[in-house]
Image: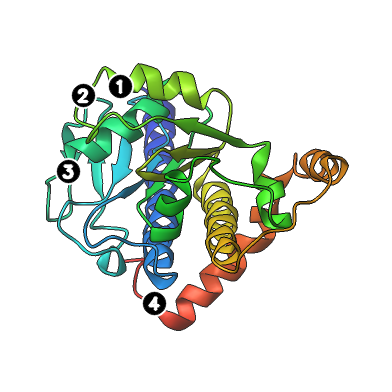
Amino acid sequence: MSTMTTMNNATDADSLRKAEWNVRTELAAAYRLVALFGWDDLVFTHLSARLPGPEHHFLINPYGLLFHEITASSLVKVDQDGQVVESGGLARVNPAGFTIHSAVHMGREDAGAVMHLHASDGVAVSAHKDGLLPLSQTAMLCLDHLCYHDYEGVALNLDERERLIRDLGDKSMMILRNHGVLTAGKDVAETFTYLYFLMKACEIQVKTQSCGPVYMPSEQAIQTTAEQSQQLGMASKLTWPALRRLLDSKNPGYAV
């Protein structure tokens, strides 16, 4: 092997290591932000991210850590079958959690990150017969990105992956009926931004419906807002740096 080839291989490997660390840091930040917003569920639910490189490796939380404890180095690297490739301590992965995440990552090449929550307001809306209603501007910005998947039990059956991907289609937000919410995006920043909008819409709906009869916007307003929502993911360019600053002031230490 020539010296030049050796140098190029070393440079490529170094670039991959740096890229992986960046994804680790971003995903650890997202975990801690979920905890900061009060959306976590003890050690349950998961956020995952696809790693750069040809191996089809992903990062997910070690089963047993609370979300506010997650660090970049504690995240577990798994393959597409959920087998642990590398861990920084706890190596156990929740099989039900990975069923959902592997389905999206394997079925959608554009899904760089996937986030799934059991937060109360999201579950409440998932159990509402009408699902997410256009009761707020926030909800109307979500509707064109949203789809639904019926509950089949705890996600241990790998056969469910095909149905979940079918129901997800090309959407970025999903309400898992009687279960929770899920978002998928090109990277952690975009996926968390979708998650924030979806959770905020659910929170507003739960509060609104507790107040009595609701006022519905016109169909024209709903359609106009849907058209205006097409670049919603681009908001992450503004929201994510701000969210990282918020986290640095409230719960630093994730980037280790």
| 69 displayed left or right of 197 | left
Label number found at residue 157: 2
What's the CA distance linking mark 2 and mark 1?
6 Å
Give the residue number, with chain letter if any, for mark 1: 160
| 18 displayed left or right of 228 | left
Name the residue located 41 percent from the left edge and 29 percent from the top edge: 104
67 or 223: which is nearer to us? 223
10 Å crowding of disc 4: few (<14), some (14-19), many (20+): some
Residue 109 visible in the picture: no
Mark closer to the observer (4, 1): 1
What's the CA distance linking mark 3 and mark 4?
25 Å
Report if the CB atoms under discs 3 and 2 are less than 8 Å apart.
no
Residue 186 drawn above or below residue 243:
above
Mark closer to the observer (3, 4): 3
Label number found at residue 93: 3
Q: Position of residue 130 (x, y in %)?
A: 55, 40
Ranked by sequence position, the earlier of labels 3 and 2 is 3
106 or 196: which is nearer to us? 196
The single residue placed furthest to the front in the displayed view is 213
Determine the secondary structure under disc 1.
helix
The amino acid marked with disc number 1 is: Glu
Give the residue number, with chain letter if any, for mark 4: 252
Report if the CB atoms under discs 2 and 1 are less than 8 Å apart.
yes
10 Å crowding of disc 1: few (<14), some (14-19), many (20+): some
Residue 241 drawn above or below residue 160:
below
Q: Quadrant for the C terminus, please.
A: bottom left
Name the residue located 12 percent from the left edge and 54 percent from the top edge: 90
Report if the CB atoms under discs 3 and 4 are less than 8 Å apart.
no
What's the CA distance linking mark 3 and mark 2?
16 Å
